[in-house]
Amino acid sequence: MNQTNPEPETTSKPSALAQVVNLFVAPGQALDYARQKPGMWWLPLGIVLVLQAVMAVWVALTINIAAWRQMMVETAARANPEHAQQAIQMITQHGRSFLMFTMLAGLIGMVIIELLYALYLFLADKLFSADSRGFGQWFSFTAWTWLPVSLGIIASLIAWALSNKSGHLDQLDVTNLNTLFFHVKPGSHLFRVAQFSLLQFWVIGLTTYGLKRWRNHGTGKALAVALAPYVVIYAIMYFA
């Protein structure tokens, strides 16, 4: 009687898309994946950028452009009377396209912010660790830990779908502290500080957890590294 050797068991590793889900339910696995596959940074960043682009185009095409134009003209005249005429002319002549361009520019802003944060983590790692990791790994780390931002964009899309499409874009970000709690008017120092999003607490928590997992930092040290850029930036925004 011939005996056949049993086939070896194969274990399938979670796919990249599965790691997107893992970031929210099992972040340790997703952060390990970010360390092992730094070249996959484009997936979490791409999700955020695609959602942001969809929101920019949808809002620009469906907004009550006359109401938005009037609101922006009044804001420009109030904020900077000396240079208001140039801004008013631009808004009046290129209302909808100007709005779409402005919102799409946020995509470039998001990429720049993540690049700068990754650079900061890279430099901090060189300072605190003898065996520092490369910039590519820290950019992968940043792209994955900032993925919760996508939930804020989804929330904004839902809010826009339920709105009357008026020109009040300051209510579009339903996760920032000003929309939820403070309701500070533009022009105040507190207005800029109050734009802090609740989801940034999630990002800071993931960054702290990731630094502990990647570099074996203590909780206090990891939290300090994660928080430092926010403290500096919001202090500048408040006192500037």
Image (tube, rainbow, N blue to C red):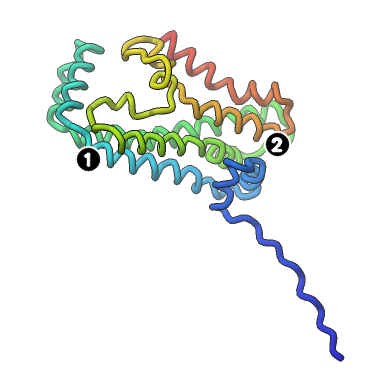
- The three-letter amino acid code for the residue at tag 1 is Leu
Residue 190 placement (x, y as % from top left): 41, 11
Please give the name of the residue rendered at 55% of the width and 40% of the height, measured from the top-left corner: 144
* Residue 224 figure quarter: top right
- The three-letter amino acid code for the residue at tag 2 is Arg
Where 2 falls versus 130 (above or below)? below
- Answer with left or right where residue 171 lies relative to residue 152: left
Label annotation for residue 61: 1
Please give the name of the residue rendered at 39% of the width and 28% of the height, measured from the top-left corner: 174
Residue 78 placement (x, y as % from top left): 22, 11
Q: Quadrant of the C terminus?
A: top left
Please give the name of the residue rendered at 38% of the width and 36% of the height, measured from the top-left corner: 108
As drawn, which residue projects farthest toward the front? 162
Residue 73 placement (x, y as % from top left): 18, 20
Label annotation for residue 95: none
- Answer with left or right where residue 19 lies relative to residue 236: right
As drawn, which residue projects farthest toward the bottom? 1
Please give the name of the residue rendered at 58% of the width and 20% of the height, measured from the top-left corner: 228
- Answer with left or right where residue 58 lies relative to residue 140: left
* Residue 92 figure quarter: top left
Label annotation for residue 213: 2
Where 194 falls versus 62 (above or below)? above
Disc 2 element: helix
> Who is closer to the viewer here, 181 or 70?
181
**How many marks do you count on the picture?**
2
Disc 1 element: helix
